[in-house]
Amino acid sequence: MKAGVIVFPGSNCDRDVMVALEQATGRPPAAIWHRETVLPDLDLVVLPGGFSYGDYLRAGAMAAQSPIMRAVVAHAEAGRHVLGICNGFQIAIEAGLLPGALLRNAGLHFVCRDVWLRVENAATPFTRGYRGGDVIRVPVAHHDGNYFADPETLARLRGEGRVAFRYCAADGDAGERANPNGSADDIAGILNERGNVLGLMPHPERLADPALGGTDGRPMFTALVESFA
């Protein structure tokens, strides 16, 4: 699998996801500065977590206008894969790759802790390393992770199997007590219509190595490698 990670001013998880990708693929991914205008030949583009442009104006809004994003959008429109993690999810939404919006957390506080996720769709290149209904532990670290969409969009996401992950309790039950940010329908990650773009607020790359305290995030990266083998 040929992967590349876009680096924006303020990215702080680009290195983390590069390490996870190198461990999965056996070779370092390309680091692509946001001012570039052309992507190399890649199977996967990752929009990493962090605070691009300091979250000024609106989280992800400025990064979505970076020159490289035109090439990222074209990459996705050609059916190739894009993974947006945390700020990368915000950027993907601002760039029109995914529907909805990410608002301030319901409690208006930055949330930084491990959460539980339930795998809702295990039939994608991103999630095939899990089984539907699996409960995994993954960290979150965000202030603007409250997923919002109109009722019609939410119904379409549910009906088309485009909710990839939901926040839940350790026993798999969803609900307000397990939702760290107020996201509608407990949504933690969604797919586009073609299933080749995934955006999620939690950080799988932060639990992809035993040295980090767990490996629940590793199957996402190994599954991608297997998908492009």
Image (cartoon, rainbow, N blue to C red):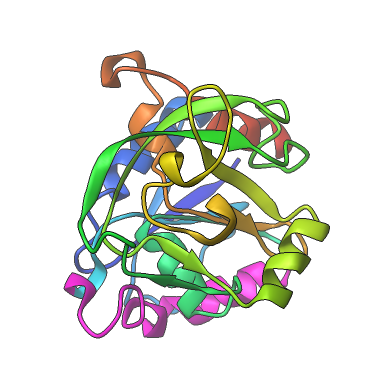
223 to 154, vertically: above or below: above
- Front-lying residue, 89 or 75: 89
* Magenta segment, prevailing SS (helix, strand or loop): helix
Front residue of 73 and 207: 207
Where residue 78 sits, quadrant-wise, is bottom right
* Quadrant of res 48: bottom left
Residue plotted at (30% across, 50% down): 14
- For residue 210, side relative to residue 93 (left or right): left
Look at the image and tell me in which quarter the C terminus lies: top right
Please identify the quadrant where the N terminus is shown: top right
Position of 83 compared to 109: left or right? right
Q: Which stretch appears magenta?
A: 54-78
- Is 77 colored magenta in this rendering? yes
Q: What percent of the width, then of the height, locates residue 13?
A: 28, 48
Between 101 and 88, the one lying in front of the other is 101
Image location (x, y in percent) of residue 50: 26, 57
